[in-house]
Amino acid sequence: MQTGNDHSIKTLNDLIETTLDSVNGYRHAAEGASDPELKALFNERADKRQELGRRLQAEVRSFGGEPEDDQSLLGKLHNKFAEVRGELMGRDDRGVVDEVERGEDFIKARFERATEDSKLPDAVRQRIMQDYTTIKADHDLISGLKHRWN
């Protein structure tokens, strides 16, 4: 039987992996962007996500768990796919922003789902809801960038 702590640890570790996927995705996007403002934006978001990952890791430790410290296998595969696709098809800032938005859609959905998890203790859900607010704001910013080109 899974305890409340076990469920919290598993959920938080899933969010950590997704957050680390996002850190790596933003770093990759910063490398692929040619516009200096986009590079700066992506690096800033990567730093913010890195800090979020650290906070989530501390939360896992507070439950006596061992926090994830690497991105997910799916995230690694996605990053490699985006890299190969960029090399084959060429990179432009519009394509980089499109790729970042896909990542933002994914992380937003993961955090949103966690905010609705009634099995999580209220304190954990509240923490995730606060983080979700930031994730959603970043998502909306990137979505706005994408739609400027359309």
Image (spheres, rainbow, N blue to C red):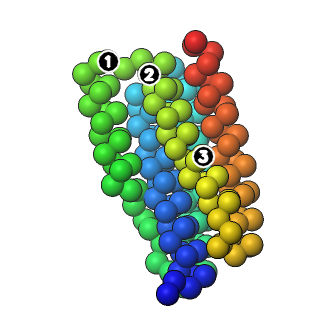
Asked whether residue 77 is in view, the answer is yes
The C terminus lies in quadrant? top right
Q: At 48% from the left edge and 54% from the top edge, which residue is drawn?
A: 18
Question: Considering only vertical position in the picture, is 78 above or below 121?
Answer: above
Q: Amino acid at mark 2?
A: Gly
Q: At 45% from the left edge and 30% from the top edge, which residue is drawn?
A: 99
Image location (x, y in percent) of residue 22: 49, 46
Please state which of residues 10 and 62 is positioned toward the viewer in this rendering.
Answer: 10
Asked whether residue 34 is in view, the answer is no
Q: At 49% from the left edge and 26% from the top edge, which residue is drawn?
A: 98
* Circle 1 residue: 90
Q: Amino acid at mark 3?
A: Lys
Labels 2 & 1 near each other (Cβ < 8 A): yes
- Which circle's residue, 2 or 1, is located before the other in the chain? 1
Question: Considering only vertical position in the picture, is 28 above or below 118?
Answer: above
- Which circle's residue, 3 or 2, is located before the other in the chain? 2
Q: CA distance from mark 2 to mark 1?
A: 9 Å
Labels 3 & 2 near each other (Cβ < 8 A): no
Secondary structure, mark 3, is helix
Q: Is residue 122 left or right of residue 27?
A: right
* Circle 3 residue: 108
* Circle 2 residue: 95
